[in-house]
């Protein structure tokens, strides 16, 4: 194995058309086409999906664990944001 | 020679190509330039082994002498193998492996696209499954050839050296087997004379994009349709066949 394996790319797989793309891991690659092919070869060998996204890892902006308090805890006591105070008419079915 | 015998020989030609090339590129397993590429090439080898297995199984059935796909793979000698010479050429460096792959992938994509319409239903079925795999192999090897050609001076030189080594073996892919003309006439196999200019055009484009020149009027090796091979096939088969030959009853 060489020292440089190229930059990292994040891989997202869509199981079926219409469903969300789900992050499944990452690959090394030197260009877009190589990233797409590597993602195909590493993550879709067992019928995992019908469509792929690859995104340069450095293009992803992530919150850091230290931000969790300020970012997410304020939502903890805002139960009124959950739509649990409504009667769902029978005709709607599963929501 | 009847049609069945011709078809049997033709199936050997097809299956031996995949088997020998898969054995070659399997040698990269665990030694690839990096993990993802290692896995990619291993996948490709598995596709080729799988295809050869189906073809040999069918060939054995057609022959009617009770030979299994393993018998045909492991107990035929060098002078009974019909793979094109290009398939047995050494791996060299990664540029050489990818250029060899691109030459074969391009040929196989054209060939198997036509075989999908073969009058032989089994062969057409195997081809329909294989052609999708080959389309991917080709996309993979073509993008590597362009990458080497347009990368650094070093990568470009490596590709050029690979070209110098491999080009003379490309013509042999288009040689026809004994009796192949009858199969073409009967609608079982495509005419390689029709596929050749298509291959030449695609490869010329690929090499132009990779800034590699094609030698004019180059000497072309031949002989594989008569099972006459380069010095490289014998050692490959010896390694591939040693286990079942030493332990004929060995089971996985």
Image (spheres, grey):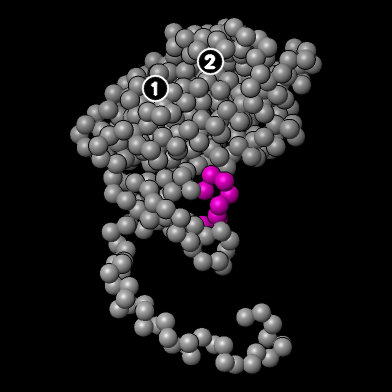
- Badge 2 is on which residue? B240
Q: Quadrant of residue A88?
A: bottom right
Q: Is residue B146 above or below residue B101?
A: below
Discs 2 and 1 share one subunit: yes
Relative side of B90 to B16, left or right: left
Whichever of callouts 2 and 1 sits on the residue coming sooner in the sequence is 1
The quadrant the C terminus of chain B occupies is: top right
B146 vs A92, nearest the viewer: A92
Q: Provide residue A43's location: percent of width, then percent of height.
A: 48, 48
Q: In this rendering, which labeled residue sits more in front, label 2 or label 1?
A: 2
Q: Residue B46 lies in what quarter of the image?
A: top right
- The residue lying at 78 percent from left, 13 percent from top is B65
Q: CA distance from mark 2 to mark 1?
A: 16 Å
Q: Chain of mark 1?
A: B
Q: Is residue B147 above or below residue B168?
A: below
**Picture coordinates of residue B185 (x, y %)?**
70, 26
Q: Any magenta on residue B219?
A: no
- Magenta region: A44-51
Q: Position of residue B92 (x, y in %)?
A: 35, 21
Residue topped by disc 1: B91
Instruction: Look at 32% across and 73% down and name the residue there.
Output: A68
Q: Residue at x 25, y 40 (%)?
A: A4
Residue A48 colored magenta?
yes
């Amino acid at each position: 194995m060489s020292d440089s394996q190229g930059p990292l790319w994040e891989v997202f797989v869509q199981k079926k058309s219409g469903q969300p793309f789900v992050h499944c891991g990452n690959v090394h690659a030197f260009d877009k086409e190589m990233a797409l092919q590597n993602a195909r070869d590493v993550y879709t060998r067992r019928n995992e999906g019908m469509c792929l996204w690859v995104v340069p890892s450095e293009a992803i902006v992530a919150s850091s664990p230290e931000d969790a308090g300020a970012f997410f805890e304020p939502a903890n006591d805002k139960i009124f944001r959950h739509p649990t105070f409504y009667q769902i008419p029978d005709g709607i079915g599963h929501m | 020679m009847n049609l069945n015998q011709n078809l049997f020989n033709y199936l050997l030609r097809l299956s031996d190509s995949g088997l020998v090339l898969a054995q070659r590129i399997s040698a990269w397993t665990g030694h690839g330039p990096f993990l993802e590429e290692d896995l990619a090439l291993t996948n490709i080898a598995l596709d080729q082994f799988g295809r050869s297995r189906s073809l040999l199984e069918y060939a054995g059935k057609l022959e009617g002498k009770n030979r299994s796909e393993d018998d045909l793979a492991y107990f035929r000698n060098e002078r009974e193998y019909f793979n094109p010479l290009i398939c047995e050429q050494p791996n060299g460096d990664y540029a050489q492996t990818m250029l060899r792959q691109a030459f074969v992938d391009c040929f196989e994509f054209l060939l198997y696209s036509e075989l999908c319409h073969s009058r032989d239903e089994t062969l057409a079925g195997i081809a329909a499954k294989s052609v999708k795999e080959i389309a991917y192999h080709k996309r993979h090897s073509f993008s590597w050839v362009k990458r080497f050609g347009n990368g650094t001076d070093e990568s470009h030189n490596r590709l050029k050296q690979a070209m110098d080594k491999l080009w003379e073996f490309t013509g042999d892919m288009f040689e026809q087997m004994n009796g192949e003309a009858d199969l073409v006439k009967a609608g079982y196999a495509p005419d390689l004379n029709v596929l050749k200019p298509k291959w030449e055009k695609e490869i010329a484009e690929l090499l132009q994009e990779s800034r590699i020149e094609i030698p004019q009027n180059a000497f072309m090796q031949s002989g594989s349709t008569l099972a006459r091979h380069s010095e490289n096939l014998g050692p490959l088969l010896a390694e591939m066949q040693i286990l079942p030959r030493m332990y004929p009853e060995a089971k996985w």
